[in-house]
Image (cartoon, rainbow, N blue to C red):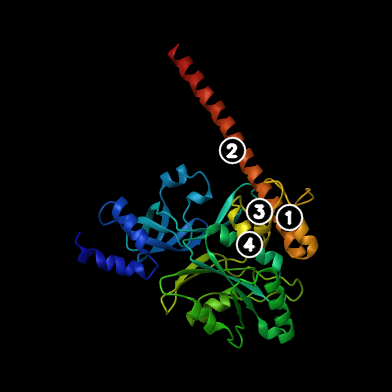
Amino acid sequence: MSQEEKEPLRNSLAALGLTPELRSYISDNLPEQPHIARVIREHRERYAVSDGENEYDAEITGNMRYSAASRKDFPAVGDWVEITPYGPDQAIINMILPRKSVLARQAVGKPGEIQIISANIDYAFIVQAISNNFNINRLERYLTICYSAGIEPLLVLSKIDLVSPEVTDEAVRALAKRDRHMKLVLLSNVTREGVDRVISMMERGRTYCMIGSSGVGKSTLINTLLQREALKTGAISSSTNKGRHVTEHRELFVLENGSIIIDTPGMKELGLTDDSTGLSTTFRAIADVAAECRYPDCRHVSEAGCAVVEAVEKGDIDRDSYENYLKMLKEQERFTITVAEKRRKEKHFGKILKDYHRIQRKNQEE
């Protein structure tokens, strides 16, 4: 295929965020003229994919389903895939291309398992409603998950029209006390304050996602960015102070300025996985001081010569942040132990199965 013949395909996929690195991978590793698409919607293992010109309802091959070791081996919104179209609007997903990033959390109710939220994300807008959802401990969980994935987080404090300027100022000061490096947007979907700031932060060809609890204004903001009612919206209940799950699936949209946005369902639970890089980045102040501890395996609880505990006592490290760090560290350790235990059991079961087949073959030979 000549360069001229390749270019139209590249241009149509570039609008969906295809990177030069992935183009190079496709050129070096796939057969000529592969049919590349991006997963733009996912709902209960059914997918919609787009090649930049056409959209297909898609499903994975039986071999992909059979060989999948975990949910990480299934497609997610944002994934780049190689497909085989059939019929006017149907396709089979043959393979998932290498992922640049994976936004994931511990699967709810399934210890030791990971749930992928979306893939190939550059930036994540973490949305919290300042009126009734603002919680720095929860924010630090979102930050940890983003940093673990190599995704840059951007905080949006929404619904500022529902509180006084004094309440907003207090929240901003509390955030600065915990993390002065956080990029912050104050937003009102009613007055549109902050909307232009969000748009100015979004670059052509980059992929962004909206994450946060239900009812904080994620879908409303995406509708505002799209300038149409593409998503259902719902308010936080006045009786329970919690949002309703209006978004039931994950979906990718291309904005007028060429940037790409993914909406995700609201998440009540946000369990951590076993990636420790995100924790050390979120709590960088603790990680920096920890290097001065007397013992390299210090757990920063009550050990003699612990520089972290000393810094907390002096007020150099915020105590609330420190306590949240310890809580999340224990949770991460439990996940790691659970995964190790599951692998041990799987290995033991595999040995039993192998011995069984060996005995069966021996009996047949006799």
Of mark 1 and mark 4, the one earlier in the sequence is 4
Q: What residue would you read off at disc 4?
A: 282
Q: Image quadrant of residue 125?
A: bottom right
Tell me the kind of residue under disc 4: Thr
Lower position in the chain sequence, tag 4 or tag 3: 4
The outermost residue toward the left is: 2
Earlier-in-chain disc, 2 versus 4: 4
Q: Choose between 244 and 275: the one closer to the eye.
A: 275
First of labels 2, 1 by sequence position: 1
Disc number placed over residue 291 in the picture, else none: 3
Binning the other alpha carbons within 10 Å of mark 3 as few (below 14), some (14 to 19) or many (20 upward) gives some
* Separation of residues labelled 1 and 4 (CA atoms): 18 Å
Query: Vertical placement of 248 versus 162: above or below?
Result: above
Query: Do callouts 2 and 3 mark residues in contact (Cβ within 8 Å)?
Result: no
Residue 103 in sight: no
Mark 1, Cα crowd under 10 Å, few <14 / some 14-19 / many 20+, is many
Q: Nearer the viewer, mark 2 or mark 4?
A: 4
Amino acid type of the residue tagged 1 in the rendering: Ala
The CA span between labels 4 and 3 is 16 Å
Question: Which is in the foreground here, disc 2 or disc 3?
Answer: 3
State the residue at coordinates (45%, 16%).
Answer: 364
Between the C-alphas of marks 2 and 3, the distance is 32 Å
Q: Is residue 96 left or right of residue 319?
A: left
Precedes in sequence: disc 1 or disc 3: 3
The answer to the question of whether label 2 and label 1 lie on touching residues, with beta carbons closer than 8 A, is no
Between label 4 and label 3, give the one nearer the viewer. 3
Query: In what quadrant of the picture does the N terminus appear?
Result: bottom left
Quadrant the C terminus occupies: top left
